[in-house]
Image (cartoon, rainbow, N blue to C red):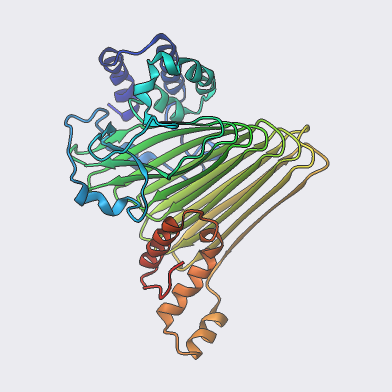
């Protein structure tokens, strides 16, 4: 039985095991039918031309973890931003860990998605979003909609500012031979509200894991959202990250994606403009080696006038690694005065490394300022020679050049402790110690 058939047969057991309200039950049934019709994406689809899931899907993934596993904080402390106090939502093999988490309902909601689905207090809020969830017919998002059992619910009410950053961390213990988890996050940021969120998926051993994650962010008028994704997993971990962001008038949302580890990582990042004077920022740094594969697929849908979007992705690829960047800017006829910028720069530090870049612009408005650029090259040998002439060893010179290459993205991180953490991870990936801190 292949994985698709296993999932379809498992859905029947899933329905019997979990008591769902009528709204969610209808959405789930619609989603599993969509997945049944479409199946897993293949390279025949243009959006997946350079990324194949075939090798992953050969694993005999367990859909439901059989055991609840406890984790000591001392064993996972290094994965948290312990330099600063944060709210924490921690999940182990897809299940919530109250021991490792720090939640709140005081002024803001940082809690479990499952805990609010059936509460009358939240029903009017959630019903607003159910129809939007049902309309997402991408096959992997549909699969997640059908099977998602748990995830984060973050609600920042009107004019509230989250008093500290929020960390969402998913651990896989690997006690199953191979595990598939499907977390679901719903984030609502009210009018004039502000929040900073850090998301991480981390395997704790070498058993294969496939995470099919969906995060939905709804930013209301003049909301301000800073979202950071840290992807620095082990070589047997596979991540498909689907993020959908709907922005209202004058909102500002920035998503930074740091891809440093894992086997196959696919980031689907989609922005939808639903008002004027919106600002969307998409930035990322990818540093990988071995046979790792990272695919960034981005969409910014400009549907209203006087909006801006800024994309800046940097990639450093070594050994036999593969990078993919497929960035699309879509400008509707009504979206006059759009200012859309997209840049993708890549360095190949190995002759066996590969990058496939496909920037796309579809513009139907006539009064816009849109640009895109893509570069693929090697390190500047002249700069290397110049630095070595001044006593900097070759290894450190290479690292400094690569760090400078990615620094433009690092500088835009707004949490100082996270900026230091990312800097240390990059230094470790480059194999040097940086003699400074940001």
Horizontally, residue 304 falls left or right of residue 398, namely right
* Residue drawn at (59%, 36%) of the image: 192
Residue 374 x, y percent position in the rendering: 62, 57
Is residue 380 visible in the rendered image? The answer is yes
Direction top: furthest residue: 22
Q: Is residue 28 found left or right of 207 in the rendered image?
A: right
Q: Which residue: 22% across, 30% down?
A: 65
Judged from this view, the residue extending furthest toward the front is 106
Percent from the top left, x then y, of residue 186? 45, 30
Q: Is residue 321 visible?
A: no
**Quadrant for the N terminus in the image:** top left
- Considering depth in this image, is 410 or 285 the residue closer to the camera? 410
Which residue is pictured at 43% across the width and 82% down the height?
Answer: 394
Tell me residue 215's x, y (percent).
46, 34
Residue 291 % position (x, y): 37, 56
- Judge by depth and name the residue closer to the eye, 306 or 264: 306
The total of numbered circles placed on residues is 0
**Which one is in front, 190 or 152?**
190
The quarter of the picture where residue 399 lies is bottom left
Q: Is residue 207 left or right of residue 230?
A: left
What's the residue at 56%, 37% (across, down)?
Answer: 270
276 and 314: which is toward the camera: 276
């Amino acid at each position: 039985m292949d994985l698709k058939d296993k999932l379809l047969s498992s859905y029947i057991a899933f329905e019997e095991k979990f008591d769902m309200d009528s709204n969610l039950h209808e959405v789930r049934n619609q989603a599993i039918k969509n997945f049944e019709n479409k199946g897993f994406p293949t390279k025949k689809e243009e959006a997946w031309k350079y990324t194949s899931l075939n090798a992953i899907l050969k694993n005999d993934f367990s859909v439901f973890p059989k055991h609840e596993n406890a984790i000591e904080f001392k064993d996972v402390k290094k994965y948290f931003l312990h330099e600063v106090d944060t709210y924490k939502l921690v999940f182990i093999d897809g299940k919530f860990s109250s021991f490792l988490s720090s939640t709140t309902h005081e002024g803001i909601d940082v809690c479990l998605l499952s805990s609010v689905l059936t509460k009358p207090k939240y029903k009017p809020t959630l019903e607003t979003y159910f129809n939007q969830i049902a309309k997402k017919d991408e096959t992997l998002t549909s699969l997640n909609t059908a099977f998602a059992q748990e995830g984060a619910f973050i609600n920042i009410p009107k004019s509230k500012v989250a008093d500290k950053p929020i960390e969402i961390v998913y651990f896989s213990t690997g006690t199953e031979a191979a595990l598939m988890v499907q977390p679901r996050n719903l984030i609502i940021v009210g009018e004039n509200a502000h929040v900073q969120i850090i998301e991480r998926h981390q395997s704790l051993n070498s058993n294969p894991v496939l995470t099919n994650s969906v995060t939905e962010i709804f930013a209301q008028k003049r909301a301000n959202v800073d979202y950071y994704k840290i992807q620095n997993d082990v070589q047997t971990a596979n991540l498909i990250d689907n993020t959908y962001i709907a922005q209202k008038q004058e909102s500002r949302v920035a998503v930074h994606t740091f891809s440093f580890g894992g086997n196959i990582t696919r980031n689907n990042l989609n922005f939808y403009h639903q008002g004027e004077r919106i600002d969307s920022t998409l930035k990322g740094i990818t540093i990988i080696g071995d046979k790792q594969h990272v695919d960034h697929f981005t969409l910014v849908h400009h549907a209203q006038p006087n909006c801006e979007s800024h994309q800046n992705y940097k990639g450093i690829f070594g050994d036999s690694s593969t990078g993919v960047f497929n960035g699309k800017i879509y400008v509707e006829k009504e979206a006059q005065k759009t200012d859309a910028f997209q840049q993708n720069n890549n360095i190949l530090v190995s002759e066996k490394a590969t990058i496939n870049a496909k920037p796309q612009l579809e513009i139907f408005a006539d009064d816009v300022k849109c640009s895109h650029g893509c570069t693929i090259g090697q390190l500047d040998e002249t700069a290397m020679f110049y630095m070595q002439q001044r006593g900097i060893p070759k290894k450190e010179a290479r690292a400094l050049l690569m760090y400078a290459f990615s620094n433009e993205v690092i500088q835009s991180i707004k949490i100082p402790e996270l900026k230091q953490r990312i800097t240390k991870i990059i230094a470790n990936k480059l194999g040097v110690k940086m003699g400074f801190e940001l």
